[in-house]
Amino acid sequence: MMLSLAEGLSVVQVATMVGITQRFVSKGARCFLLHGIEGLADQPSGGRRPRLTTTANGAQASRG
């Protein structure tokens, strides 16, 4: 992706070629410019908290 953008292809062209959305191409390019190659690594996300947890005795308890 980054090489294609550097060669002058547009975000739309790269997204179509790679098969992902323009948003992800733009986000990847922005992260690359800010942080270099490390910026392309997956970052942990918050995500949704689990609804069920396991208690010390192995039984499942619901979080309301």
Image: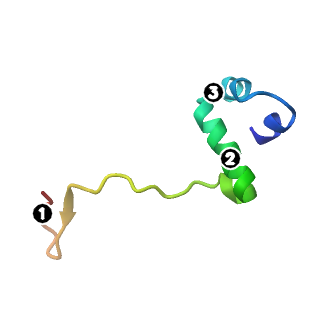
Residue 8: horizontal and vertical position, in percent?
85, 31
* Residue in the picture at 77% in, 41% down: 2
**Residue 19: mark in rendering:** 3
Q: Is residue 53 above or below residue 11?
A: below
**Residue highlighted by disc 1:** 61
Q: How much space separates mark 2 and mark 3, taking CA atoms? A: 19 Å
Q: How much space separates mark 3 and mark 1, taking CA atoms? A: 42 Å
Considering the image in quadrants, where does the N terminus appear?
A: top right
Q: Characterize the local packing of mark 1: few (<14), some (14-19) or many (20 or more) Cα atoms within 10 angstroms.
A: few
Residue 52: horizontal and vertical position, in percent?
19, 58
Inspect the image, locate mark 3, and give the three-letter code of the amino acid beneath it: Gly
Please tell me in which quadrant of the rendered image residue 49 appears.
bottom left
Say which of 11 and 41 sits in front.
11
**Residue highlighted by disc 2:** 30
* Residue in the picture at 73% in, 23% down: 13
Query: Which numbered disc flags the more N-terminal residue, 1 or 2?
Result: 2
Query: Which numbered disc flags the more N-terminal residue, 3 or 1?
Result: 3
| Label 2: element kind | helix
Q: Is residue 11 above or below residue 51?
A: above
Inspect the image, locate mark 2, and give the three-letter code of the amino acid beneath it: Arg
